[in-house]
Amino acid sequence: MKQVQPNSPDVEKWLKLIRADGVGPVIFAELIKRFGSADRALGASASELSKVDGIGLKTAERIATTRDKFDAGAELDRAEKLGVWLLTCEDARFPPVLKRIYDPPPVLYVKGEVTRDDNLAVSIVGSRICSHYGCEQSSRFAHLLASSGFTICSGMARGIDTAAHQGALAAQGRTIAVMGCGLANIFPPENGKLSEQISQSGACISELPLSYEPLAQNFPPRNRIIAGLALGTIVIEASLRSGALITAKAALDYNREVMAVPGKIDSPFSKGTHQLLKEGARLIDSVEDVMEAIGYLGKQLESHVGEAAAKATDKVEMPLFDARDLKLSGDERAVYNLLDKDPKHIEEIIAETALQPGSVNAALISLRLKGLIKQLPGSMFVRS
């Protein structure tokens, strides 16, 4: 377990101010600009507050009557018990690339560690419901980029996000998960172990109070942080209504590069991704493409990244068995030759091989035992 870092100075007062009704990141920044500190803003009258840009009298009254309602002391006590520390945007440890966005979070909750190495970061995002191909590409890009020294940022959602974090961890690289809920809640719940691994090899972060639930309205603001932490964002498999498109738009707004990995032209999982490509996102199919996309810095790193990626590829474990070295029955050979990296349902396999269902089932079991194929949820099968 890593030692928890100390909280930023005056963080208790920052928490009280940001939790007042009517105060968001932009208004918070205006209050600090006008009064010079969170302490002075907390002590200002409603009349004084109303003179701040963007705050009318009604909002000023709401701020004045709610700025002491949030129990910041209790929040800090609970954070300490959970191994979480709090970071304000005035702290030197706050990620400088995130501080440069239009609406940086005034306070970040952190479980793990943020370091100067995270200034070299790429975000990878995509749909929760995705294909095997999408997960494979997410993990591949994350693994190669993390092997090259990049921090991988994502949202720890199911699907593409989870695959990105796992790819970075497999490379023993750094990864940051930006949560759409408080850090006392793990969402999705099955990623509890993953969140612990991330906090040991990077950080889980959130701008939300510890107890906040993963509500739908939390995720668009969360996505701006994912975009703001990185030099560029890679979108892998996004439907037309995917939240990944919000992240891509935020990246564009912050003058960061937007990249997309193409998918099948008839796949609903890639409709949003292809729309981004039509609108000018950079098409990528290699880490060299990523280096070219991020411009001058990428050009300086290109040879290093190429070498690191080649070494990482060499380390990827291969299946224990090669089909050519095994004596397969006719049924096993027919089923194996039909499969590739695109998942196929058992009913498709039966139909396309014209074998009896019992023969297909027996062949699938044998091929799995030999390590040549994998079974995915929903009776889907792919080559290992």
Image (cartoon, rainbow, N blue to C red):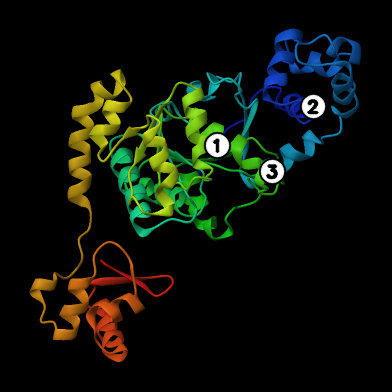
Looking at this view, is 64 or 36 the one in front? 64
Residue 275: % across, % down: 42, 39
- Judging by the rendered image, the residue that carries numbered circle 1 is 223
- Judging by the rendered image, the residue that carries numbered circle 3 is 210
Which amino acid type corresponds to the residue marked 2 in the rendered image?
Gly
- Where 124 falls versus 347 (above or below)? above
- Where 27 falls versus 141 (above or below)? above
- Judging by the rendered image, the residue that carries numbered circle 2 is 22
* Mark in front: 3 vs 2: 2
Q: In the rendered structure, which disc, 1 or 3, sits on the residue that comes first in sequence? A: 3
At mark 2, the secondary structure is: loop
Q: Do the residues bearing badges 1 and 3 touch, measured as CB atoms within 8 Å?
A: no
Residue 179: % across, % down: 58, 43
Residue 35 seen by the camera: yes
At mark 3, the secondary structure is: loop
Determine the CA span between mark 1 and mark 3: 18 Å
Which amino acid type corresponds to the residue marked 1 in the rendered image?
Asn
